[in-house]
Amino acid sequence: MSTAELVYEKTRHLPENLQSEALHYVDYLLAHQHPEGEAVAWTKFSSSELTKQYVLADAIYDQD
């Protein structure tokens, strides 16, 4: 029996709230498996947007 099948067999007997917790943990593991995961993508996006806002705000001080 594969590991995935063992995980399925064991988790299907858990109550719904613990199945949900197990699913969240699997999602956590998947997100941290790839360095270019969703969290990194959001960090890059946030940094890019923040830079755009500072550039626009600083333009006010460049006017005479």
Image: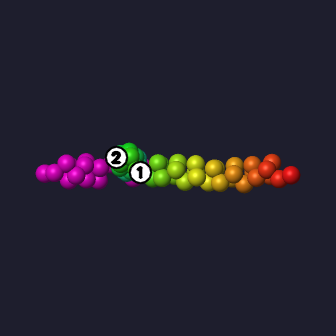
Specify start and end residues of the magenta stretch as a single range.
1-18
- Which residue type carries mark 2? Gln
The reply to whether dot 2 and dot 1 touch (C-beta < 8 Å) is: yes
Observer able to see residue 60: yes
- How packed mark 1 is, by other alpha carbons closer than 10 Å (few <14, some 14-19, many 20 or more), is few
Residue 13 percent coordinates (x, y): 29, 50
Image coords of residue 40 (percent x, y): 47, 48
Closer-to-camera residue (29/19): 29
Check disc 1 and report the residue beneath it: 37
Asked whether the viewer can see residue 18, the reply is no
6 within the magenta span: yes
Residue at the image position 20 percent from the left and 53 percent from the top? 5
Count of marks placed on residues? 2
User: The residue under label 1 is which amino acid type?
Assistant: Gly
SS label for mark 2: helix
Q: Main secondary structure of the magenta part?
A: helix
17 inside magenta stretch:
yes
User: Quick one: label 2, few (<14), some, or many (20+) residues within 10 Å?
Assistant: few
Residue occupying the far right of the picture: 64
Q: Residue at x 55, y 54 (%)?
A: 45
Image x and y of residue 26, in percent:
35, 48
In-image side of 10 versus 47 (left or right):
left
Question: Residue at image x 16%, y 51%?
Answer: 2
- The Cα–Cα distance between marks 2 and 1, rounded to whole angstroms, is 8 Å
Decide if residue 36 is on the left or right side of residue 7. right
Q: Nearer the viewer, residue 13 or 4?
A: 4
Q: Position of residue 38 (x, y in %)?
A: 45, 53
Residue 33, numbered circle:
2
Secondary structure state at the residue bearing disc 1: loop
Furthest residue in direction left, as rendered? 1
